[in-house]
Image (tube, rainbow, N blue to C red):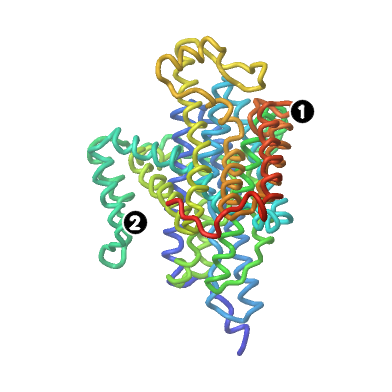
Amino acid sequence: MNKEKALVPFFRRGDIGGVSYAVTNNIVNYLIVIATLTGVLGWPDDIVFGFVVPGMSIGLMLGCFYYAWMGYKLSRKEGRADVTALPSGVSTPAMFVILYGVVMPLSYALEDPKLAWSAAMAACFIGGFVEFFGGFIGPWMKKRIPRAALLGTVAGIGFIWMATQGVFDILSDPMVGLPVLFIAVVGVFGGYLFPKKIPPLVVAIVGGIIYAFCLGRTTVDFSRIGFYCPNPATSIQYLINGFAVVVPYLTIIIPVEIYNFIETMDNVEASNAAGDNYNVREAQFADGICTMISALFGGIIPNTVWLGHAGLKKANAGIGYSIVSGVVFGIAGIFGLFTFLNSIVPPAVCAITFLWCAVVMVAQAFDVCEKKHYAAVGIAMVPSVADYLYTQVTGAAGLAGHYTEVLSTGINDFTADVSQQLLDAGVMWNGVAATKAGAILIGILLGTMTVFVIDKKLDKVAVTGVAGYVLAALGFIHSAALGLYPLSPYALGYLSIAVLAFILHLGRDSWFKGPDKFDYI
C-alpha cells in the first residue's frame, strides 16, 4: 500500500456533519456561559465579551487544531485514510460545576465582577494544570476509583444542576419550550430522523430560534459585534491576583478536573475501540495545555475530548471538521459573533441541550455500571443535592439579611439561631452546609465505599476511610477552607470507618461472613 495515497484528506463530505455536530453543541455551551455571566450575575460586557468568550475560543480553537494534527499523524503512521479526529469541546459537566460551584459563589461573596473573574481564571488555569498532570496519574487513578462512584457523582451534578434548570427554563416559557422539547425528544430519545437524515435536535434548536423570533421573544442585535482580541498582559495580571482568592475553592476545582481528565481518558479509549488508536496521555496533555492557554487569555471553562467519536466515524468524518470548527470558534469569539447569537437564542432553546445532556449523564451512570453497583451510583449522587440546596437557601436568606459565616466547626453555615429557624420552617438544612463543602469528593468517597462493601472488599473500604480522614483533616471536604483539622469530627468519623472496616475484614473467614451472592434489589 502506498501510504502517501492513504493519507486522510484535509476535508471530505462527512466533515460537513462533523462541523454541524461540533459547532452546534459548543455554541449552546457558549450561550449558557454568556447567559449566566451577563444575565444572572450581571458581569459587564467588557469582561464577558472582551476576555471570557475570546479566551474560551482561543483554547477551543487550539484544541481543534491539535486533534486534527493528531489525526493526521495517526493516518501517516498507519497508512490509512479512514481516520477521524477526536472531537474537542467545552466540558459540559465541568462548565456547570465551575459556573454554579465556583463562579456563582465567588460573585455573590466578593460582589466584585472583576475580582470574581480573576479568581475564575485562576481556577481554570489550576484546572488545566491538574488535567495536564492527569496524563501522568490518570491511568493509575482510573484503576482505583470505581466507575459507579465517579459516574454517580457526575450524574448527581447533571441531575440537580442541569436537568432541573433545563425543565425550569422550558416551563418558564411553555409556548416556546414545550414544542421545542417535543421535537428534540423524538429525535434524541426516539431515534426519529427528518428527510435527508436531518436530526430533530438540530431542527429543534434552529426551528426554536426562528419560532421564538416570530413570537417576539428574541431580537436581532448586531450592536456588540466587533473586534475582541484580549490583551494577555492584562488578563495575566488579573489571573495572578485571582490565585489568592480561589484557594478555598480548590475542593471543588480539583475533583472537577480529576473527572475532566478521566472523561478525556474514557472518550479516547472509546475512539480506540472504534478503530482510531490515539494516545490517551497525549490527549490529556493537550487538553491541559489548551485550558491553561485559554485561562491566560481570560477563559474560565476547561477543554476536554468530547463524546461522539464513534458517531462521527460512522458518518465518515475525517480531520477537516476539526480544522473548520476551530476556525469558526476562533472567528466567532474574537469578532463577537456570540453576542449576536445570544440575542436571538431564548433560554428555553438552550435548556433543551443541557436537559438532554443531563439525562444522558444519569442514564449512562446506570447503563455502564453493574446492576449490583446501582446503590453506589445513587449514594454518590446525593452530595450534589446539598450543593444545590445550599446555593438556593443561602441566596434566598441573603435577601432577608441573613448570611453564612465560618463557624467554630470550620463549616461555612448560618448561626445556630438562623439554622434553627430554617429547620422550624421545614427547610431541609441539617447537614447541608457540611455536605456542600467538597460535595464532589464526598460523593466519590461514599460511592467508592459502597462499591467495595458490595464487592466484599472491606479492606479497601478501610483504605478509602483513611483517604477520607486525610481529605477531611486537610480541609478538602467538610470545611470552609484548606488547613489542618486532624481532630475534626468529620475526619474522626472517616477514621472510625477505616478501623471498623479493617476489624470486620479480619473476621471475614470466621465470625463475620458475607454471602457470595446478595441481591438487594
Q: Is residue 193 visible?
A: yes
| Neighbour tally class for label 2: few under 14, some 14-19, many 20 plus, Cα within 10 Å | some
Q: Residue at x 60, y 26 (%)?
A: 114
Q: Is residue 419 above or below residue 335?
A: above
Name the residue that disc number 1 marks: 484
Q: Is residue 361 above or below residue 123?
A: below
Extreme residue toward the bottom, this view: 1
Name the residue that disc number 2 marks: 188
Q: Is residue 92 visible?
A: no
Q: 452 and 294: which one is in front?
A: 452
> Which quarter of the rendered picture does the N terminus lie within?
bottom right
3D distance between C-alphas at marks 1 and 2: 48 Å
Q: Position of residue 221 (x, y in %)?
A: 37, 36
Badge 1 element: loop
- Quadrant of the rendered structure where residue 339 is? top left
Question: Which circle's residue, 1 or 2, is located before the other in the chain?
Answer: 2
